[in-house]
Image (cartoon, rainbow, N blue to C red):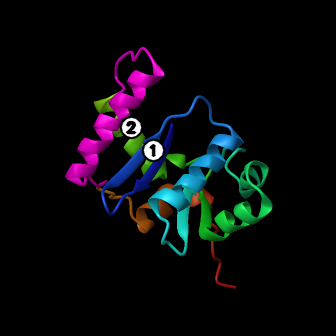
Amino acid sequence: MFMFLEPLAGWRHVKVTAQRTKQDFAVCMNEMIEVHWPGAKKVRVVLDNLNTHTPASLYERYPPEKARHLVQKLEFHHTPKHSSWLNMAEVEISVLTGQCLDRRIGSRVELESEIAAWEIERNERKATIDWRFTIPNARDKLKRLYPVYDGR
């Protein structure tokens, strides 16, 4: 599953693929730009650290001109390796799991149908994430990941 999420707007879209290949990632990035945010000058994408989540994946899937167009519209941000739980998409996936995927689902068609119904309901409610993790909280909890300024 690939999660598209605009947390402040209360919008999400889940794309189900057979795998999570570079090709799948590239198709999702194209869909994000061409379908979901075609008028955007720049789209910030928060990603986990999978080796498939790179601009190179776009060049492997599309002709150079198309890949370059997509890369210029995307701004990649990777979550820290040991704190990916900060990723709001993971919070939304957790909600999806608890509300929809907490049982055996027999086929991909059934999975897509269940996710679509969940997505429609969440989007109609404009359900947002109540994000309470602030920068000071992050600096305290993740102090080993932040550089220490010694005043020199």
Quickly name the residue at label 2: 94
Where residue 25 appears, as percent x and y from the top left, is 63, 46
Q: Give the residue type at disc 1.
A: Glu
Q: Give the residue type at disc 2.
A: Ser
Secondary structure of the residue carrying tag 1 is helix
Please identify the quarter of the rendering in which residue 45 is found.
Answer: bottom right
Where residue 66 appears, as percent x and y from the top left, is 71, 62
Query: Which range of residues does the magenta coloring cover?
Result: 101-129
Residue 37 is inside the magenta segment = no
Q: Which mark is residue 90?
A: 1
Where residue 47 appears, as percent x and y from the top left, is 58, 52
Q: Is residue 11 left or right of residue 87?
A: left
| Front position in the image: 142 or 94 | 94
Q: Determine contact: label 2, label 1, CB under 8 Å.
A: yes
Residue 109 is inside the magenta segment = yes
Please identify the quarter of the rendering in which residue 6 is found.
Answer: bottom left
Q: Is residue 37 above or below residue 29?
A: below
